[in-house]
Image (cartoon, grey):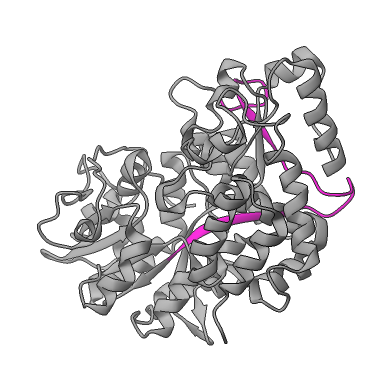
Amino acid sequence: MKSILHRRLLASVAAAGVAGLALAGCTGDIENGGGGAGGDADCADYEQYGTFDGAEVTISGTIVEVEADRLIASWADFEECTGIEVEYQGTQEFEANIEVLAQGGNAPDLGIFPQPGLFQRLARGGHFVEPSADTQANVDEFWSEDWKGYGTVDGTFYGAPLMASIKGYVWYSPAEFEENGWEIPTTLDELDALSQQIAADSGHKPWCIGLGSDAATGWPATDWIEDFVLRMHGPEVYDQWIAHEIPFNDPQIVEAFDAVGDYIKNDDYVNGGLGDVRSQLSVPFGEGGLPILEGECSLHHQASFYEGFWGEGVTVAEDGDVWAFLTPPVNADDPQAVTGGGEIVGAFDDREEVQAFQTYLASDTWANNRVAEGGVISANSGLDPSVASSDLLVQSIEILQNPETTFRFDASDLMPGAVGADSFFRGIVDWIGGAETQEVVDEIESSWPAE
């Protein structure tokens, strides 16, 4: 393992639209001006990248607020040791605007893409330059073939993986579980039985959910659907669904929708401390689980990255304020299967300093630096799990690094953008609003682009 960065830099964040991604005169930038905070980096780990005089690299993505601060801190030593100034610009409108910027020749040097489907569309449009041999060597050394495949389009490698998350965690209060004698479920049937027990015994709705996310409202419920497709029908059906080898309205997908609907469209189960079923659409996803801290609900389905939303002073531990278990399988002895997300870094320019920075982001050094800053994980095999900021994230890293784990990337992120980032989200909004399952899946299926 390489040196670990423990400094944290402060940066400002502002929401931005298309202009927020423009690389000049932007008031919505998150900037890290040149070369680290303390001038005390051990540069031995950075000699391989070379040294530069007055070079600048621009990089953009959807990462904002405290996570952007931590991201910026993760390359401070790289800046100090190489002389490359990295300017990061974060906006939640990145996915909506990056293709327009690329077509107009105004893209940043590098983009951080949370949706492989969008990344692959830009690659097929000829917008990326191929990474250097050093970047590819890092990916071959530290990443699985599956992860490399997310950045590979029609046999050509274009982008390196970055961070990761495990989805399908169910957050809860250990103290409340102990006080009531509730057991962690080991099957989906036991999860439903637990929900019924909480509804009957606690005086509050068992689940609290937030689906609000501006133009992407509804996406947290797509994670529920994906978890249930994988657990109920296995990885082969999951892969067929993503590839459209079975239609979106296949009976197996309908079955998963209805199983999820038994929870999130159930007036007896949601929306603890927040309102009725429809309230899920107006509650920001980052606030969805917080009623657990007030004893107003008991369960919240959200990814490993939700650790960062609990707030200062909240202990994430088995005996802490909150902890989480994975959505269980159909049968207790089924193999571990999880869905997850991550990012792919693509380059729009092949200048030497851009290649050096892309190579660094694909390294074990960067992975350890970033995870040590807190709040995230990576599937980089050179990552030391012990540097993670909580026991839950240590566990998540170990799950990703376990060769026995069946891991599948978030389905909506792999589907064509017209589906995964549009009609699927809109379908969830209609579904929570009262539309029937068959009506929703038929409409989503009709939006699938023609071959």
Q: In the rendered image, is residue 48 in sight?
A: no
Residue 380 found in image quarter: bottom right
Q: Which residues are magenta?
A: 316-344
**Residue that appears at 53% across and 42% down:** 211
Say above or below: 188 vs 164. above
**Residue that appears at 61% across and 19% down:** 296
Foreground pick, 370 / 223: 223
Judge left or right: residue 78 versus residue 289: left
Say above or below: 266 vs 145. above
Residue 150: give x, y in percent of width and height: 54, 71
**Residue that appears at 76% across and 60% down:** 254
**Residue that appears at 28% across and 61% down:** 59
- The quarter in which the C terminus is drawn is bottom right
Foreground pick, 209 / 114: 209
Judge left or right: residue 360 versus residue 76: right
Residue 159: give x, y in percent of width and height: 44, 73
Residue 147: give x, y in percent of width and height: 57, 68
Judge left or right: residue 211 versus residue 301: left
Query: Per the image, is 333 magenta?
Result: yes
Say above or below: 330 vs 273. below
Foreground pick, 403 / 410: 410
Foreground pick, 249 / 389: 249
Residue 447 found in image quarter: bottom right
Judge left or right: residue 192 versus residue 135: right
Q: In the rendered image, is residue 119 in sight?
A: yes
Query: Per the image, is 45 magenta?
Result: no
